[in-house]
Amino acid sequence: MTIDLLAKQGAKKVYTNLAGRTYEDILFKRKEMQNQFSPQIEQEHQREVVAKIKDVKYINDAFSINSNITWFTMEQISSRIVWIVENDDVEQNYDGLISTCREKVVALICYGKHIEMLKKTFQGIVPSILPVNNINDAVILASAVAQENDVVLFSPANGSQEDIEKRGLEFRRAVNNL
């Protein structure tokens, strides 16, 4: 066997290996996305009905750490929505939510470091944009704004996996204190 033939066989194996890994990565990511959007999988803080108070449902969707998951949750709700958002992320893009918000969201209650971006994005789309200081104030205001058969949805549409538990528990606590 010549050195050239050996080099060609080695290169072929490298390319075959890379193609196999790429294919596995794509399958894994596809499966991961499927799991995120699958309604059969029950997870804490994901479309979780915390309470129904005076015919208003309070839904904890702290699991929604991007706007795609928030969109999916909103699409499953047939009632009017009072949306509570915490925005601490400068880079978040909410453009995919505009048409759904125009149809379903009657009030946007926001808090966090970057609420100006939310106001700018949803101005003229959502009838009421109400800034508050924290989740407790947001839940109290949502209970005052919501009407019979409305849904108060806590769905941050940003953040990280580490934030889910903390945000979800804070929302639950605030609702239970009503």
Image: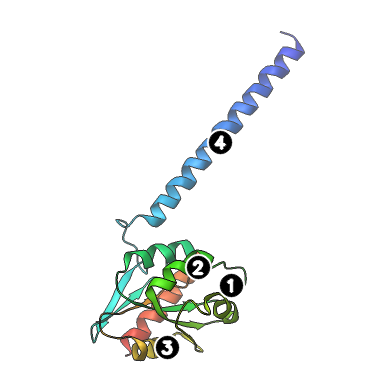
Q: Quadrant of residue 84?
A: bottom left
Taking the image as shown, residue 169 lies to the left or right of residue 66, namely left
Taking the image as shown, residue 150 lies to the left or right of residue 29, namely left
Tag 3 secondary structure: helix
Coloration of the structure image? rainbow
Residue marked by disc 2: 162
Task: Estimate the x, y position of residue 90 in percent, counting from the top left.
Answer: 62, 72
Viewer-nearest of labels 1 and 4? 1
Q: 140 or 161: which is nearer to us?
A: 140
Tag 4 secondary structure: helix
Can residue 62 be seen here?
no
Q: 23 or 162: which is nearer to us?
A: 23
State yes or no: discs 1 and 2 in contact (Cβ < 8 Å): no
**Of the residues under marks 4 and 3, which one precedes in the sequence?**
4
Q: CA distance from mark 4 to mark 3?
A: 47 Å
Task: Estimate the x, y position of residue 91 in percent, counting from the top left.
Answer: 62, 68
Q: Which mark is residue 136?
A: 3
Q: Mark 2 Cα within 10 Å, few/some/many (few <14, many 20+)? A: few
Q: With respect to residue 2, does 38 lie above or below?
A: below
Q: CA distance from mark 1 to mark 3?
A: 20 Å
**Of the residues under marks 2 and 3, which one precedes in the sequence?**
3
Residue marked by disc 4: 21
* Residue located 32% across and 68% down the image: 77
